[in-house]
Image (spheres, rainbow, N blue to C red):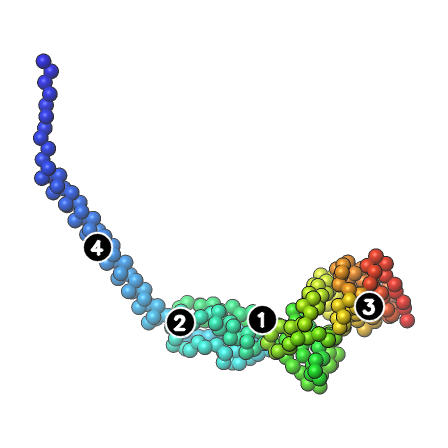
């Protein structure tokens, strides 16, 4: 006859082992939590006690002195380096100093703050309501001048007649938004073919009858802005074929066939 053996389990031993394991786990969790808490407290003390602003540096500025820029930066020496809002400072600088186009604020730990600005450059000068306004190539109003002309300022004269609002520090607003689209297309084409410095004037009083002056030598009629890039490309090729001393008029309203009249 086969014999079988049965061993009686001691439940008390197993219960004791489980209790010991739970205690060990609770101790581990406690010490880990204690370590993390101490680390966080130490980090907070370092941040709020030792990481304070001691130096503010401004770079990229030409139009505005560093002192003028810092007047509009609400960061105090001795202030915690993480206490300020970079986006708020950027918006504040752009609204108060129109020539500032972009702002980058970097925390140079442990105690420095670097403020890098990119300034707008005036490209157009537009006569509006008796005053001359300087505009960027993206039509941001940078400054109001009195008694100055585009020629004396070395800028491209811009003729307009459907302006809704012109406020320094903001983009020019038009009654007909398609005028803005036309100007954007024009400048993009000038830039693409590297003639933006040659364009002396742009007349978009009618977006269907656009005129530009090239280098003081040619009065150019573009018609509307359809196929504007093709027209500007055609213009560049025509001028390359002419003599450097040639002057006159060029009709590019038909982008397939231009009419040139030399004077």
Mark 2 / mark 3, whichever is N-terminal? 2
Residue 220 lies left or right of residue 26; in this view the side is right
Where residue 100 appears, as percent x and y from the top left, is 57, 73
Residue 22 lies left or right of residue 97; in this view the side is left
Disc 3, SS: strand
Q: Using the rendered view, name the quadrant where residue 76 is placed.
A: bottom left
Q: Which residue is mark 1?
A: 101
Q: Residues within 10 Å of mark 3 (few under 14, many from 20)?
A: many
Name the front one of labels 4 and 3.
Answer: 3
* 138 over 152 or under it: above or below: above
Residue positioned most to the top: 1
Name the front one of labels 1 and 3.
Answer: 3
Dots 4 and 3: beta carbons under 8 Å?
A: no
Name the front one of labels 2 and 3.
Answer: 3
Q: Is residue 187 visible?
A: no
Q: Which residue is mark 2?
A: 83
The residue located at (20%, 48%) in the rendering is 25
Identify the image quadrant of the N terminus.
Answer: top left
Dots 2 and 3: beta carbons under 8 Å?
A: no
Q: Is residue 27 visible?
A: yes
Residue 48 numbered tag: none
Where residue 181 appears, as percent x and y from the top left, is 69, 65
Where residue 6 appears, as percent x and y from the top left, is 10, 26
Q: CA distance from mark 2 to mark 3?
A: 56 Å
Residue 220 numbered tag: 3
Where residue 126 appears, as percent x and y from the top left, is 71, 77
Disc 1, SS: strand
The residue located at (40%, 69%) in the rendering is 82
Mark 1 / mark 3, whichever is N-terminal? 1
Mark 2 / mark 4, whichever is N-terminal? 4
């Amino acid at each position: 006859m086969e014999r079988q053996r049965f061993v009686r389990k001691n439940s008390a031993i197993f219960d004791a082992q489980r209790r010991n394991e739970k205690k060990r786990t609770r101790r581990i969790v406690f010490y880990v939590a204690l370590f993390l808490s101490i680390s966080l407290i130490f980090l907070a003390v370092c941040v709020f006690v030792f990481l304070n602003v001691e130096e503010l540096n401004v770079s990229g500025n030409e139009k505005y002195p560093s002192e003028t820029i810092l007047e509009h930066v609400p960061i105090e020496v001795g202030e915690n380096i993480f206490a300020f809002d970079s986006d708020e400072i950027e918006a504040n600088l752009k609204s108060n100093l129109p020539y500032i186009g972009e702002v980058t604020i970097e925390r140079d730990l442990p105690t420095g703050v670097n403020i890098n600005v990119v300034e707008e450059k005036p490209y157009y000068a537009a006569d509006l309501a008796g005053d001359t306004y300087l505009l960027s190539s993206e039509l941001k109003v940078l400054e109001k001048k009195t008694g100055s002309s585009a020629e004396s300022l070395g800028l491209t004269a811009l003729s307009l007649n459907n302006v809704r609002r012109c406020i320094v520090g903001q983009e020019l607003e038009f009654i007909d938004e398609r005028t803005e689209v036309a100007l954007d297309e024009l400048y993009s084409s000038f830039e693409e073919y590297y003639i933006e410095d040659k364009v002396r004037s742009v007349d978009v009083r009618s977006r269907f009858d656009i005129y530009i002056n090239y280098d003081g030598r040619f009065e150019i009629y573009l018609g509307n802005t359809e196929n504007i890039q093709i027209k500007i490309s055609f213009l560049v090729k025509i001028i390359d074929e002419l003599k450097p001393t040639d002057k006159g008029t060029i009709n590019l309203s038909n982008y397939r066939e231009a009419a040139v009249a030399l004077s």
